[in-house]
Amino acid sequence: MKRLAFGLLAAVLLAVSCNDGRMVVVNGDQVVVTLKAQKKYLIFPIHDGAPQTQLTFKCGEEDIFGHQIEMYLATDSAQLYVPVDISEYRGKKLDIYIDKAHAEWFGVTALRQSNDFDFEYDEQYRQKYHMTPYHGWTNDPNGLVYHDGVYHLSYQANPYGNLWGYMHWGHTTSKDLVHWKEQEVILRPDSLGCIFSGCTVVDKENTTGFGENTLVAVYSIDGNGQRIGIAHSTDGGYTYTPYGGNPVIEEHRRDFRDPYVLQIDGKWVMAVTIGECLRFYESDNLAEWNFTGEFGRGVGSHDGWWECPAMFPVPALNEADTVQKYVLLTSIYPHGPNEGGAVQYFIGTWQNGTFVEDPLDYPLWLDYGRDNYAGVVYSNTGSRAIYIGWMSDWAYTNHTPSVEFRNGMTIPRDLEVRAEGESFIVASVPSPEIYTDKSFEETRDEFVVEGSECFDILKNNDGAYFIHFTLSALGEYGFRLKNNEGEMIEYKFSVVDGEEAKVVMDRSRSSKVVFDEDFSSRLVVCPLVAGESYEVELFVDRQSTELFIDNGSRVMTNQIFPKKFYDTIEFFTDSAMTVGDFSAAKMGK
């Protein structure tokens, strides 16, 4: 390496000639790396504790990405590496401008070219039967659409690190809602801003003029405020072209995002969140929108901002219903029923350009766990409302101990309205496709527990499994998942005088990996309808638990990060308890 110091106007520049042909020039707090593109990728060392830097990539006068890329470029050592594809520029000179950086940072000195990008994909907390991103950060599920036999799931993605920022739409597909295939990113930041959450619909009647059965993504643009844009795909949802007239809605607000679109009476209807309520718009062609009304003021929970709405029709709830009913979802953060994020719902009708709620005991919660947020439902699935949520919580998501990727999605769930007493609830039922992934099932005959009873869950347990059983008892009782490291989680049921009932999850001893006090210290409480027995289904997958009670009438989704898989189950009671229909099966073939 050869260094040349020289002056230019009032700035002091430092030129560093590297043995691999790179030239590094320092001008104040900007570093410029010049190199000849010879391989497929530039590999950048990243560390999530480093300062955030902005990088601009140029080939001559061409700005390759049209905007800056944000990275947490490593200063001393790398936590992970991220690739930037430069294959289109092989043989050409590239200039990488790195703002607020230093030439001696590891992220500059260890920057390299490579034709391969290898990393430990199957790391400790990589889930087996849940959708997780191939690499990098993910949050909200976006653009859920079923088309030509394929379930498309896009998601908020940062391909350049494992922290939130610089949002794209990542993209995965599945033919069975169980096995997911990573696809190319479909929406990238552009001159208008980053790509925040939204939806995708099938324009069957060519209302847009893009062609029959074209897929149209409707999304938030974050830049100069938040606005709404659209893009279309004519190849079945694998590549998208942003609309030249974006943004299609601009309200000059900072919090104006997460559009969800469906058709009602031949019109396209859009719900958008603004702070603590929703605004509705109508359109004939998905490009020109008219404001029609608001919803949410004075109803439901307002202990935080509203995000990620979704709306879908449901069958008549009783014989007296003469108009179409709808369910409206919206996520709320930071004060759900157990603090953190949660999804609340409303049941009602569509009247005069807005949603009108039925008189129910709001707020109503779709999931009482800490780790089910920003969930929406698939479009183009007929009468099925298939739901997927983001499995994390903003309170601690940046600190969870996975490395090459961060976060994932819940299992798919079919939402259905059912009667409960004299009222109605929205139940979350595990989608039937998920059960096709079971194997090596083990069962036990009915048994009675007095005090406690403990046994192995499965042979050859690899941390991804499903458990089913019924519990019949009164008082306090429940079960624990444990390992030989002393780590455990506990679900304690409490039924008092046959009237008040709840189940409480305790994950304070779930892991010896201490990464966030808010994660481990807080009990997670779910109210129940009092009864003498409950049906329990529990899906466990390395870093997650999803508890379904009484066929999805109550749900709790909570992450876990044990050092070793939980391999035993302990049933406990303060009197006597009958455990029936016990079965356990491996998941993730």
Image: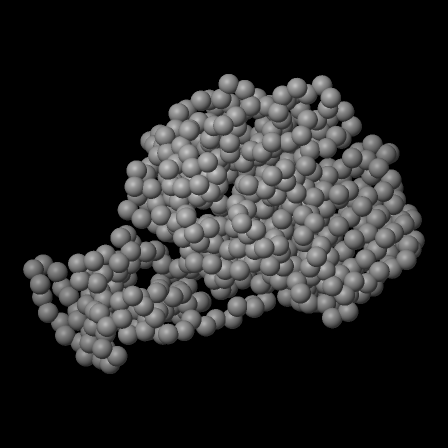
The residue located at (67%, 48%) in the rendering is: 431
Looking at the figure, which quarter contains the N terminus? Answer: bottom left
Q: Measured along the vertical axis of the image, is residue 328 above or below residue 102?
A: above
The residue located at (44%, 43%) in the rendering is: 214
- Place of residue 215 in the rendered image (x, y in percent of width and height, measured from the top left): 45, 44
Q: Measured along the vertical axis of the image, is residue 75 above or below residue 449?
A: below
Viewer-proximal residue among 205 and 577: 205
- Place of residue 583 in the rendered image (x, y in percent of width and height, measured from the top left): 81, 57
Viewer-proximal residue among 19 and 250: 250
Residue 18 picture quarter: bottom left
The residue located at (75%, 61%) in the rendering is: 585
* Horizontal relation, residue 274 to residue 441: left or right: left
Viewer-proximal residue among 481 and 114: 114
Q: Measured along the vertical axis of the image, is residue 221 above or below residue 436?
A: above
The residue located at (47%, 58%) in the rendering is: 183
Number of labels in the image equals 0
Q: Measured along the vertical axis of the image, is residue 521 above or below residue 136?
A: above
Give the colour scheme of this rendering. Answer: one colour
Residue 549 picture quarter: top right
Q: Answer whether residue 504 is visible to the viewer in this image.
A: no
Residue at the left extreme, as displayed: 9
Looking at the figure, which quarter contains the C terminus? Answer: bottom right
- Place of residue 478 in the rendered image (x, y in percent of width and height, measured from the top left): 80, 50
Residue 250 picture quarter: top left
- Place of residue 272 in the rendered image (x, y in percent of width and height, measured from the top left): 46, 33
Q: Answer whether residue 154 is visible to the viewer in this image.
A: yes
* Horizontal relation, residue 279 to residue 432: left or right: left
* Horizontal relation, residue 508 to residue 152: left or right: right
